Image (tube, rainbow, N blue to C red):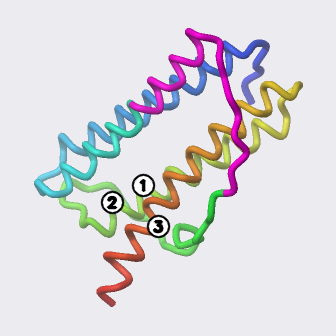
């Protein structure tokens, strides 16, 4: 695992991870043959850009406020089978993909928090983990409202 020596190392890592998410969702949007799916992926990319901007602001201003929030986990994404990325993905498959991706990001930041050498770094990682948990919850609620309701 990467060793972080400074808060800027962490922020650079997180900024890069958010940019990777932007690139990932943008690529899916551009490759999607379904207009509705393309719009969904563009929205995901836009949200990730917002997170990147927040991290850049923290890095620039060196101001960081940690709010310890409890984020509900519906665990829907934990029990859904992985889907493959295809140009003609369904909305259901896109939500599954998003849930799985956000769960992985949450786990990464949670694990990094557990090994962070000081409280400041732990809090930054916990904050990032909370953001990813919120994203996963958003996708789980969407899945519950639009996919599970249909069945």
Q: Is residue 59 magenta?
A: yes
Q: Is residue 63 magenta?
A: yes
Q: Element at badge 1?
A: helix
Q: Element at badge 2?
A: helix
**Figure check: 15 above or below 99:** above
Which residue bears the numbered disc 1? 98
* Mark pair 1, 3: CA separation: 9 Å
Which residue bears the numbered disc 2? 94
Q: What residue lies at 25% left-to-right and 52% top-to-bottom?
A: 40
Judging depth in this view, the residue of 19 and 48 nearest the camera is 48
* Mark pair 2, 3: CA separation: 12 Å
Q: Is residue 134 left or right of residue 107?
A: left
**Figure check: 83 above or below 147:** above
* Mark pair 2, 1: CA separation: 6 Å
Residues tagged 2 and 1 counted as in contact (Cβ below 8 A): yes
Coordinates of residue 28 in the picture (x, y in percent): 27, 45
Precedes in sequence: disc 2 or disc 3: 2
- Mark whose residue sits in front, 2 or 3: 3
Q: Quadrant of residue 36?
A: bottom left
The N terminus appears in which quarter of the rendering?
top right
Coordinates of residue 150 in the picture (x, y in percent): 29, 86
**Rendered image: mark on residue 124:** none
Q: Quadrant of residue 55?
A: top right
Coordinates of residue 72 in the picture (x, y in percent): 62, 64
**Rendered image: mark on residue 140:** 3
Coordinates of residue 85 in the picture (x, y in percent): 32, 55
What segment carries the magenta color?
A: 50-70
Q: Element at badge 3?
A: helix
How many residues crowd around disc 1 within 10 Å: few (fewer than 14), some, or many (20 or more)?
many
**Figure check: 70 above or below 5:** below
């Amino acid at each position: 695992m990467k060793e972080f020596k400074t808060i800027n190392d962490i922020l650079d890592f997180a900024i890069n991870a958010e940019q990777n998410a932007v690139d990932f969702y943008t690529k899916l949007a551009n490759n999607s043959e379904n207009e509705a799916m393309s719009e969904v992926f563009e929205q995901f990319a836009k949200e990730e850009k917002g997170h990147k901007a927040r991290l850049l602001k923290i890095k620039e201003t060196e101001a960081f406020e940690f709010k310890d929030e409890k984020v509900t986990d519906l665990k829907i994404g934990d029990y859904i089978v992985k889907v493959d990325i295809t140009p003609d993905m369904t909305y259901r498959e896109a939500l599954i993909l998003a849930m799985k991706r956000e769960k992985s990001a949450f786990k990464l930041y949670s694990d990094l928090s557990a090994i962070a050498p000081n409280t400041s770094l732990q809090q930054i990682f916990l904050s990032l983990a909370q953001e990813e948990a919120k994203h996963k919850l958003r996708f789980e609620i969407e899945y519950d409202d639009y996919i599970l309701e249909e069945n």
